[in-house]
Amino acid sequence: MVLLLQPVPKTMLLTRSLLVLLVLISISLKSVLVIEAQLEEWCIADEQTPDDELQSALDWACGKGGADCSKIQKNKACFLPNTVRDHASYAFNSYFQKFKHKGGSCYFKSAAMITGVDPSYGKCKYDYIR
């Protein structure tokens, strides 16, 4: 028995090549997104910092520092829990996200620290700027 092989039409080869290319691009994009997500950083209050030091840093961040502290005001999304530590975390991150690409840091006289875990909770969403 003799098998006759027919040539594959060029359009079919082109379609397969494009499909393979699209799959490879999709895999590459997913890898980039995973890597970027792993590099996200937020600035929060250090749990070991006393409340009086946090309050001083919070006052600076919301004042001269230029952080957006509107969401930690009474009856706003991030007011509760109403603690110095929670409010400082929000203010520190606001400052850090706003100024990190202009030389701003997450230091606050050692009252803050970087975390890779999004500190958002409930309706309180912490900003993250790439």
Image (tube, rainbow, N blue to C red):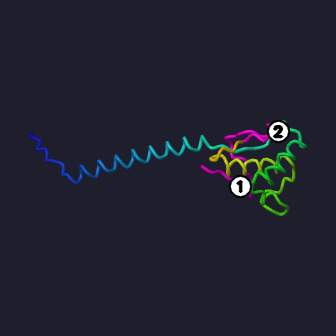
Magenta segment, prevailing SS (helix, strand or loop): loop
> Residue reaching furthest right?
52
Q: Does label 1 or label 2 sit earlier along the sequence?
A: 2
Tag 2 residue: 47
Q: Residue 125, how many percent across, how many down?
A: 71, 55
Region in magenta: 106-130
Q: Residue at x 83, y 60 (%)?
A: 73
Q: Residue 38, how many percent across, how many down?
A: 60, 40
**Quadrant of the rendering where the N terminus is positioned:** top left
Observer-nearest of 6 and 94:
94
> In the structure shown, which secondary structural element does the residue marked by tag 2 occupy?
loop
**Crowd tier of the residue under label 1, counting other residues whose Cα lies within 10 Å: few below 14, some 14–19, many 20 or above:** some
Q: Is residue 126 magenta?
A: yes
98 left or right, relative to 20:
right
Do the residues bearing badges 1 and 2 touch, measured as CB atoms within 8 Å? no
Which dot marks residue 96? Answer: none
> In the structure shown, which secondary structural element does the residue marked by tag 1 occupy?
loop
Tag 1 residue: 125
Label 1 sits on what residue type? Lys
Observer-nearest of 8 and 89:
89
Q: Is residue 108 magenta?
A: yes
Observer-nearest of 71 and 55:
55
Label 2 sits on what residue type? Glu
Q: Residue at x 14, y 47 (%)?
A: 6
